Image (cartoon, grey):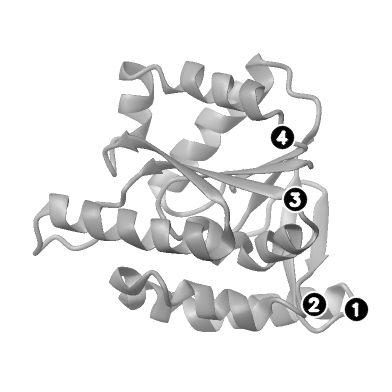
Amino acid sequence: MSTILCIVAHPDDEIVGMGGTILKYLDESKKVITIIFSYGEKSHPHLKEKIIKKTREGETKKLDELLKRKSIFLGLTEGKITQEAEEKKVRGKLAKLIQKYKPAKIFTHNANDPHPDHRAVHQVVKDVVENIKYKRSFLTFEVWNITNENAPVVYVDISDYFKKKLELMKIYESQKHFIYILLLPIILRAWNYGRKNNCKYAERFYKLK
């Protein structure tokens, strides 16, 4: 059974960016593991961070049980990923996880994502992939992107999984205000990529390796 590794900044990033592709991989009996840098505890400034942390962890566990996938939290502070990646030696931990699971493909955030945490995770993952000389597929997905990356593009037909992807996003109920903002761009993006891939809906990835 081949393993797919999704490495993200916050819970829900991988569903927004590549939820349809994850569902397709699971349908193909591939093992999906998500490594999450931060709990996203600052998403509700008016609530205590420990409450949001517990809520978002619970939402992730609910999705794990539903999809029969595995998630690993690294526990970094939202907004301090670059700093704490150094202090907590996250690159070494991430290298060990990649060597342990030997993924056939690694997915992470795009380098040009406007969110600073997403860009920080991209840089950490890129550093590790280069340092350990990872030779298999390394791809990036889009969440908040508004510009194109200068890299080869891969489209994945998610026509059979797009509706379920949107349903899975609702599991992250604590993030419904952000998901509502993203919903129309996600639909339009999937439709546009599907048109380019001669299917109804697709997700686009940039292939770095």
Residue plotted at (74% across, 23% down):
134
Amino acid at pointer 4: Pro
Q: Are marks 3 and 1 in contact (CB under 8 Å)?
A: no
Q: Are marks 1 and 2 in contact (CB under 8 Å)?
A: yes
Residue to which mark 2 is pinned: 194
Q: CA distance from mark 1 to mark 2?
A: 6 Å
For marks 2 and 3, give the one nearer the viewer. Answer: 3
Amino acid at pointer 3: Lys
Amino acid at pointer 2: Gly
Give left or right: position of 111 versus 201.
left
Snapshot quadrant of residue 5: top right
Task: Specify which label sits upstream in the sequence, 3 or 1.
Answer: 3
Q: Which mark is residue 30?
A: 3
Q: CA distance from mark 1 to mark 4?
A: 29 Å
Pick the residue in front: 77 or 2. 2
Judge the density around disc 2: few (<14), some (14-19), many (≥20) Cα neighbours within 10 Å: many
Q: CA distance from mark 2 to mark 4?
A: 27 Å
Q: CA distance from mark 3 to mark 1?
A: 25 Å
Residue to which mark 1 is pinned: 198
Estimate the x, y position of residue 169 in percent, counting from the top left: 48, 73
Residue to which mark 4 is pinned: 103
Give left or right: position of 204 versus 127.
right
For marks 1 and 4, give the one nearer the viewer. Answer: 4
Judge the density around disc 3: few (<14), some (14-19), many (≥20) Cα neighbours within 10 Å: some
Task: Specify which label sits upstream in the sequence, 1 or 4.
Answer: 4
Q: Secondary structure at mark 4?
A: loop
Estimate the x, y position of residue 187 in percent, counting from the top left: 61, 82
Amino acid at pointer 1: Asn
For marks 3 and 4, give the one nearer the viewer. Answer: 3
Please say if 144 is above or below 129: below
Whether residue 198 is visible to the viewer of this picture, yes or no, is yes
